Amino acid sequence: MSIDNHKYSDWDVRRVKELDIRQFIPGCNHRKTTQDIECPFCGKKKFAVNAKKDFNNAKCWVCGQGFSGPIAAVAYYSGINLDTDWLHALEETARQGGIVITPQERRREESIAAAIEASRQSFCNQQLEASGLTLEDVTASIIEGGQELFMPTFRKGRVNEMFVPDKSGDDMLIYYYRLDGKPMEYTSKGSSRPRQYVRVRWANPDIHRSSDGKPMKYQTPAGAPSRIYIPEKIRRLYKLKSHIDTLFLQEGEKKAEKACKHGMLSIGIQGINNFGSQQEGLLQDIQDIAKACSISNIVLVMDSDWNDLHRAIKVGDSVDKRPNSFSKAVIKFKQYMSTFHNIGLSVDIWWGHVNENDHGDKGVDDLLCGALLSREQELLEDIERTMHSHDGRGTWLNIHKITAISDAKIRDFWLLNDVHAFYEIHKAASNI
């Protein structure tokens, strides 16, 4: 089957295949689910038509010829070569069967147009535009209610006190979908009913505060595990089992989408410490992508403030609290990714960060919208050079291979094993 046959969704194709074969074979009694009629190939009255559930086919007991389903039957009686013009046969079967099927590209365009109209001047639109993204960039092929749909994963709306989303309100809702396109779900404590996994980016963080009183920009449903955000480009490559040489883990959904838009194939995590556990599904999703796409390298990417001290150090806090937290996240990342070798996956593990620049770019999305605006291809070129350099130092990102280095060596990136050097570098950075 050629790639042209992806013109229609699997759902539309399945609807056509499930049409009753009897309506396309002359001489069939529509009241009988099984019957023998005259064979259109050899003329013998041994052509067994079976319209029972899970069958829907026909075959001659004498000559062995037959139809695997309604599309094959229509192709034969309409003179269509099924091997060279399957798409024509599908469309003709739908026409004769009274089913309207719509090309995926047209459905996608209609969905994007509707989403744009609904989101004009919204906070969601502003957030996407700030990261150099459009609703078209974040539109995914998903499955909801048994149907294949095209929907943006970032939508305007709000969540109520039970974290149930609706379309009213002007916060940004981020919908998570599995690798197969179905909604990710979670079960909250004390409930057996699964809920759709949706994160929210509050338009006004000051009125949404955490237990310690700090304003929250993003919020995950209480009791929900950490999951990875999967851009449509990654989902499509996974379904096709296409090779991905290097997969990047970005801190945030928008960063993952923006990176994917410019060829830096990425998935999103909800923070450097949010790798979750095997039971929560995050690691399983990464493992499934690595296996299906024969990934060679996995890179954890941090922002340009990776080596900054905590901005609000309190009395009693250790001055190296934040660097310690970051180094532990990299060590944890390495430990988790190393387990892939246990199931026969040979993956090299890397850690990197955006470099400070004159434009003040913090994350990969800022970099692509800032210093590298209109020359985004330079980022991939720089990454390629850096990953093949002797010291892992690039122009826009530093990237270090950590597959086989010790935890102590990882701590050395933050100078945590050398008190004097740690003091001197942060003294200089603080202009003390």
Image: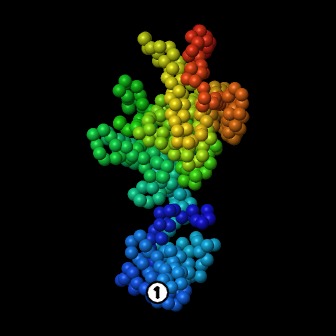
Q: Nearer the viewer, residue 119 or 236?
A: 236
Which residue occupies 46% across, 86% down? 46
Residue that numbered label 1 is attached to: 46
Locate residue 101, reporting x and y percent: 50, 68
Marker count (numbered): 1
Tell me which residue sits at (29%, 45%) in the image: 192
Residue 168 x/y as whole percent: 38, 46
Q: Is residue 370 visible?
A: yes
Residue 350 rendering spot, x and y as whole percentages: 60, 32
Of 86 and 307, which appears nearest the observer? 86
Number of residues whose C-alpha sits closer than 10 Å to that of mark 1, classed few (under 14), some (14–19) or many (20 or more): some
Quarter of the image that includes the C terminus: top right
- Residue 18 in percent (x, y) is at 44, 71
Residue at the left extreme of this rendering: 190
Name the secondary structure under disc 1: loop
Q: Residue 81 is drawn in which quadrant?
A: bottom right
Quadrant of the rendered image containing residue 41: bottom right
**Colour style of the rendered protein structure:** rainbow
Would you say 353 lies left or right of 61 here?
A: right
Q: Residue at x 63, y 25 (%)?
A: 356
Q: Nearer the viewer, residue 220 or 61?
A: 61
Q: Is residue 13 above or below residue 377?
A: below
Q: Quadrant of the N terminus?
A: bottom right
Is 98 situated left or right of 266 in this image?
Answer: left
Q: Is residue 227 visible?
A: no
Q: Residue drawn 45% across and 68% down? A: 15
Above or below, 409 against 71 in this view is: above
